[in-house]
Amino acid sequence: MSIVAAFMVPHPPMIVPEVGRGSEERIRETIDAYESVAERIAELEPETIIITSPHATMYSNYFHISPGRGAKGDFGDFRAKGVTFDETYDEELVRAIDEIAMVEKFPAGIEGEKKKSLDHGTMVPLWFIRRKYKKGRIVRIGLSGLPLTDHYRFGMMIRRAVEDTGRRAVFVASGDLSHKLQDYGPYGFAPEGPVYDERIMDVAGRAAFGEMLDFTEDFCDKAAECGHRSFVIMAGALDGTGVKAERLSHQDVTGVGYGICAFYPTGEDTGRHFLDKYLAKLEEARGKSDEYVRLARLTIESFIGEHKRIKVPDWVPQEMNDTRAGAFVSIHKGGQLRGCIGTIAPTASSLALEIINNAISASTRDPRFDPIEPGELPFLEINVDVLGEPEDIASMEELDVKRYGVIVTSGYKRGLLLPDLDGVDTVEQQVEIAMRKGRISEDEDYSLQRFEVIRHT
């Protein structure tokens, strides 16, 4: 057997009457859709219910699968301690997922549980399901701070484990939409909020799962969503499968978006291998890269994949051998920064060697990240910024966040930030981040420099 259906659901505690105490009627449309989901699951009679939750144990670089025989929980944190749960885990399926991740050297497993009790992102769906269907064990899985492509890959591994164990399973992707839909909401309003809700409900309603990978980290952060990674794991679990999608409800009455959709597999569909399509787009983009980026990529692939440091290739333009300059190599994976190291001024005898040195450092020595693994190489996006000469400026008024990078210096401390970065929209932000990187406080005297870059992609 395999995954017989999947559901995208929200998890507002107020939807439980003992918590909402009447206020849940404000989201009656969502309640009715949730009841329909529970009835559908009962009709399917799954052996296992897989639930991905943003509020289960979560790490920045690891997916946690809840271990053990089971777990209990209640809504005591929401003044409803009498609403309790006692769930049994599908230990065989958990082991199967864990083993696949281990073989694939993928960062997922059962280690590092922070809190055994069930979280509300898991309990809210179960509150509806258990009123209609008492059978079936569960698998509870947390999200991570890793790129969306890793969430999709993890979903594919979950699917393999389900098939290997012969389970008849239902997948429940728990997650709210934007938390910034209204001024009166708990997090206020951001223009990205309504855009996120409209976009994700359109994508889900069409089962256009590949488009879920195109949501940028910056956009999702500004929209303050909490379920996108959960939905992407679900999408990966349905990779290569035709899907009939039903949009059941979407509400925005509390300032937080609640969306519910149902997905039914209809058989194999070779046109729906969305991660392969994503990688093909990356490969096409690589073919358009100039020599600067080609050199950085070749350096990284050789050093990570073969543990070899390359020499400057013959195809490198003469200007890269004749020029000396500072350069930054930036590595992204799935739109997220994966490493960035550079030099403000030249340290090597040529720009080509500067890029080679910094490409190795960015992929292995950035203290913010673990060294890049060979399995990550196909997913990497690489930029090279060649720095112009820094010039002294008197104030922030001489900066332009899109055109100039900034260097902030206080004594021996120095912080630098490149220009035109996602999420950095103002000069004040740019200087603040550069100061933070240089560990320079606001009460210290500091000087400013600006510089231009030539960005190679």
Image: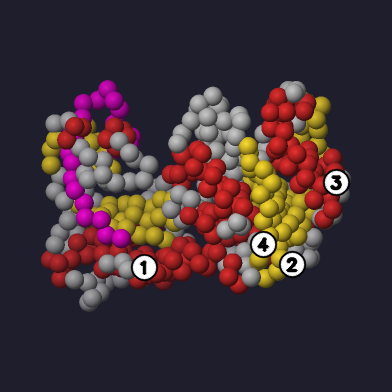
Which dot, 4 or 1, sits closer to the camera?
Answer: 4
Q: What is the quadrant of residue 97 in the picture?
A: bottom right
Rounded to the nearest angstrom, the CA distance separating label 1 from label 2 is: 36 Å
User: Is residue 452 among what the camera can see?
Assistant: yes
Q: Are marks 3 and 2 in contact (CB under 8 Å)?
A: no
Residue designated by label 3:
133
Measured Cα–Cα span from mark 1 to mark 3: 50 Å
Provide the residue designation for mark 1.
286
The residue pinned by badge 4 equals 243
Residue 451 highlighted magenta (yes or no):
yes
Local SS, label 1: helix
Q: Nearer the viewer, mark 2 or mark 4?
A: 4
Query: CB under 8 Å between callouts 4 and 1?
Result: no
Disc 1 versus disc 3: nearer the observer: 3
Query: Which label sits in the foreground, 4 or 3?
Result: 4
* Amino acid type at image mark 1: Arg
Q: Earlier in the sequence, mark 3 or mark 2?
A: 3
What are the residue bounds of the magenta stretch? 433-457
Identify residue type, mark 4. Val
Give residue 164's mark. 2
446 or 20, which lies in front?
A: 20
Q: Quadrant of residue 210?
A: bottom right
Q: Position of residue 298 (x, y in %)?
A: 34, 69
Q: Secondary structure at mark 4?
A: strand
Q: Indicate the amino acid at tag 3.
A: Tyr
Q: In front: mark 1 or mark 2?
A: 1
> Nearer the N terminus, badge 1 or badge 3?
3
At x 30% / y 27%, what residue is drawn?
A: 441
User: Few, some or many C-alpha atoms within 10 Å of disc 4 (few <14, some 14-19, many ≥20)?
Assistant: many
